[in-house]
Amino acid sequence: MEPHDFFQEAYQTVSHALSSLAAHSAESYAHSIRVGLPAIELGYREGLLAADIELLARAVLLHDVGKRHIPLSVLEKAGSLTPHERRIMQWHSRLGFLEATEFPDERKIIVAHHEYKCNPYPRTGSDRRHEQRTTERRHWDERIWHLGEIVAVTDMYDALAHPRIYKPAFPRDEIERILREEFRGDQELVTEILKTQ
């Protein structure tokens, strides 16, 4: 396949997935777009290669595509989620991973974008995010890990900075405090994301 054909096909696949997400939940779609732009800017600030910027762009736009399979009664609930509803919500990253079969590297970022929090999911254990284990089933890739951190910090920032049906937007000083306490990736990324916003 020629590079032009791959990018055209990738654009169509990402566009279709985002359109489907928008049809299911306008807020989830808007969140994906809002997370995309600062993540790409952060990638440029980090000096990523063009190929990694493209990978990051596809992954960040698709990071919540699994939410199109989460019932709206859970996804757009005004109050706190029950433990059962929280487990349903947490399935979105695995569902996104299962859907993104055309994009092997992007799907690794999609499944990992909530693994840089105090309460990570779908996988748990800090060793799965920061060190390779000899028994680890997934191949360790420093590049994918770093791109996953970028998606994670921009995702967390947007979730805090914008109102949701169940919460108001947080003020900037509270956003920084929460990110410093709860983001388990490179703290320099917190500094950088705060500069871009």
Image: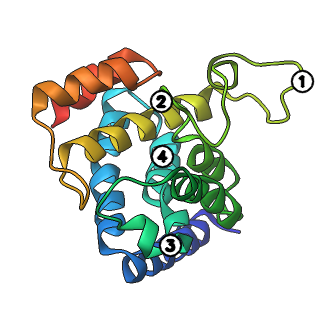
> Residue 71: image x %, image y %?
50, 74
Instruction: Residue under label 1, please give it.
Output: 135
> Residue 144: image x %, image y %?
60, 35
Disc 2 marks a residue whose amino acid type is Lys
Residue drawn 46% across and 80% down? 20
Depth order, front residue of 36/131: 131
Disc 1 marks a residue whose amino acid type is Thr
Q: Counting other residues with Cα less than 10 Å from the Cα at mark 1, is it few (<14), some (14-19), or many (20 or more)?
A: few
Colour scheme employed for the rendering of this structure: rainbow
Q: The residue tagged with tag 2: helix, strand or loop? A: loop
Q: Counting other residues with Cα less than 10 Å from the Cα at mark 4, is it few (<14), some (14-19), or many (20 or more)?
A: many
Q: Which mark is nearer the camera, 1 or 4?
A: 1
Mark found first going from the N terminus, 4 or 2: 4
Above or below 96: residue 182: above
Q: The residue tagged with tag 4: helix, strand or loop? A: helix
- Determine the residue located farthest toward the bottom in the rendered image: 23
Disc 3 marks a residue whose amino acid type is Arg
Q: The residue tagged with tag 1: helix, strand or loop? A: loop
Depth order, front residue of 106/90: 90
Instruction: Residue under label 4, please give it.
Output: 56
* Image quadrant in which the N terminus is located: bottom right
CB contact under 8 Å: marks 2 and 1: no
Instruction: Residue under label 3, please give it.
Output: 68
Residue drawn 20% across and 30% down? 175
Mark found first going from the N terminus, 1 or 3: 3
